[in-house]
Amino acid sequence: MTDKSHKPETIAAQGLGWIDETTRAVSLPIHMSSTFIRDPDNQYRSGREYARSDNPAYDQPEAVLTALENGKAAMLFASGMASASACFLALKPGDHVVIPKVMYWGLRLWLMDFARGWGLDVEEVEMSDLAAVKAAMRPGKTKLVWIESPGNPMWNVTDIAAVAEIAKKAGARAAADSTVSTPVLTHPLDLGCDIVMHSATKYLNGHSDIVMGALATKAEDEYWERIAGVRSRVGGIPGSFEAWLLLRGMRTLFPRVKAACANAQKVAEHFVKHPRIEEVLYPGLKNHPGHAIAAKQMSGGFGGMLSIRVKGGEGAAIATAARVKLWKRATSLGGTESLIEHRGSIEGPGAPCPMDLLRLSAGIEDASDLIADLEQALDGNS
């Protein structure tokens, strides 16, 4: 049995060392039941009554994530959007929230279209500008500051500890989307955040075969209980088999993320002065404006995500993506296979994403193969 005295690599690889006590199996069974027996005296001594609020299939992956994030508890959700939106749905109409200008576009659209209409006061700031973050605070009114670092798809870096402290002084909570950084590289709860969110579809699972989200918390307080209520009452829960697949993926989280980081670093360094590339956006490059902060709060690498801006504009970028043979033209990130996407086509008008930008998710293939494939794709722009 592993415990918190063991290294996180060990905790993840062994899934905390849990075994099935009945069969002594090292992989726990998948509990598919939707409901549980009530005792004759009308009690639920098993602690469970209905899977929408308490599913035994979630126990192990939630415990592993809690340990990896140095938190008090964790919750699984049906998707990254379900987990992120639960943090806002647990607030009240009229509450003020602060979000970054560069962030996952799907959540930004939901906040602008739904959350504002529902009554949240949503304000965007340049989160890397601490003075702007301070200026946005409304003590007594601001309830949540949302952080995403590195920020998708420009990979802006936010000083998580500094922003969390600003939020705390204003009486607000801080929550961090750590999907790209993962518990391998960054621990937002240790840096002062109250909540950390993951689109578990991505690196936590790592095999492009589930859609899921997750939250971990520093404290099991009243806000956490409201989030749990949102999950149960709205019903944004994953299936039991998906929870099992998540745990399967988390066992290899550390070697996968480390391999992806190494590949992203090699790709970024190779193309940083390429004649057909306008700019490489990656926190691991020393010329990146957020490199020093990233080096301070990310340990062991700078993530597996980078973007390139192709000379020749939107047409050249799309044509480059059309010519790749090894990289896969697909949305998402964090899988074993490398993905490439013209992000502007997804985000559409009004997004801060330049139309000449290609977003790259480095997988765990051989880096020289990935570089050679991008080279031949870019050569077609001559």
Image (spheres, rainbow, N blue to C red):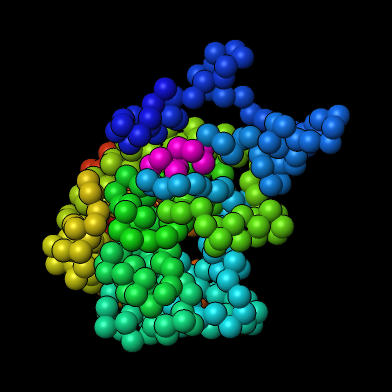
- 126 inside magenta stretch: no
Nearest to the observer: residue 307 or residue 334 = 334
Is residue 62 a member of the stretch shown in magenta? yes
Instruction: Check the picture and name the quadrant holding the C terminus.
Output: bottom left
Q: State left or right for residue 42 relative to residue 300.
A: right
Q: Which residue is painted at 51% across and 53% down in the image?
A: 220
**Quadrant position of the N terminus in the picture:** top left
Q: Which of 173 and 42 is in front in this view?
A: 42
Residue at left 72%, top 32%?
Answer: 45
Q: Viewed as shown, does residue 117 lie left or right of 335?
A: right
Image point 31% across, 69% down: which residue? 165
Determine the residue located farthest toward the front in the rendered image: 41
Image coordinates for residue 114, horizontal then vertical, percent: 62, 76
Residue 216 is at least partly visible in this image:
yes
Tell me the quarter of the picture where residue 317 sits: bottom left
- 344 versus 224 height, above or below: below
Vertical placement of residue 113 versus 337, above or below: below
Seen from the viewer's position, the closer of residues 238 and 282 is: 238
Magenta stretch bounds: 61-68
Seen as rendered, the residue at the extreme right is 40
- What is the count of numbered marks? 0
Q: Is residue 252 left or right of residue 279?
A: right
Q: Which residue is drawn at the image coordinates 32% and 54% (left, top)?
A: 190
Residue 143 pos. (x, y %): 48, 75
Query: Can residue 310 be seen in this snapshot?
Result: no
Q: State the residue lying farthest toward the top.
A: 23
Magenta: main secondary structure: helix
Residue 98 at x, y = what percent?
A: 44, 77
Is residue 169 placed above or below 263 in the rendered structure? below
Return the x and y of residue 34 as percentages of the image width and height: 76, 38
User: Foreground: 178 or 261?
Assistant: 178
